[in-house]
């Protein structure tokens, strides 16, 4: 995953249910720093990690390496 990156935000504090956003950073104080487009304008949001869920909208690339576990 790359930061900054496109994410979907789920957060009842801001009534976000799959809202498209851009994750800028994850602060050590416990906040996601996001940029969200609202009515054509980009707004900065600081959302508490404990009150939100998000996932990256771009899928991870699959590794071509196969791991084997030796007995």
Image (cartoon, rainbow, N blue to C red):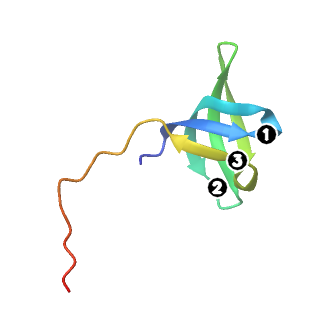
Residue 40 pos. (x, y %): 65, 13
Q: Residues within 10 Å of mark 3 (few under 14, many from 20)?
A: some
- Name the residue rendered at 41%, 48% in the picture: 1
What is the x, y in percent for residue 47? 73, 45
Residue on which disc 2 sits: 27
Disc 1 marks which residue? 12
> What separation in Å lies between label 2 and label 3 (alpha carbons)?
14 Å
Q: How many numbered discs, if any? A: 3
**Residue 59 appears left or right of 53:** left
Q: Position of residue 68 (x, y in %)?
A: 19, 72
The mark closer to the camera, 2 or 1, is 1
Which class describes the residues within 10 Å of circle 2: few (<14), some (14-19), or many (20+)? few
Of the numbered discs in the image, which one, if any, rests on residue 52? 3
Element type where label 1 sits in the image: helix
Sequence-wise first label, 2 or 1: 1
The answer to which quarter of the image holds residue 17 is top right
Between 64 and 34, which is closer to the camera in this rendering? 64
Q: Label 2 vs label 1: CA separation?
A: 20 Å
Quadrant containing the C terminus in the rendered view? bottom left
């Amino acid at each position: 995953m790359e930061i900054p990156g496109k994410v979907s935000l789920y957060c009842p504090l801001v009534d976000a249910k799959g809202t498209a956003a851009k994750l800028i950073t994850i602060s050590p104080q416990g906040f996601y720093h996001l940029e969200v487009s609202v009515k054509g304008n980009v707004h900065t949001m600081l959302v508490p990690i404990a009150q939100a869920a998000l996932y990256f909208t771009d899928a991870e690339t699959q590794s071509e390496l196969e791991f084997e576990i030796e007995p």
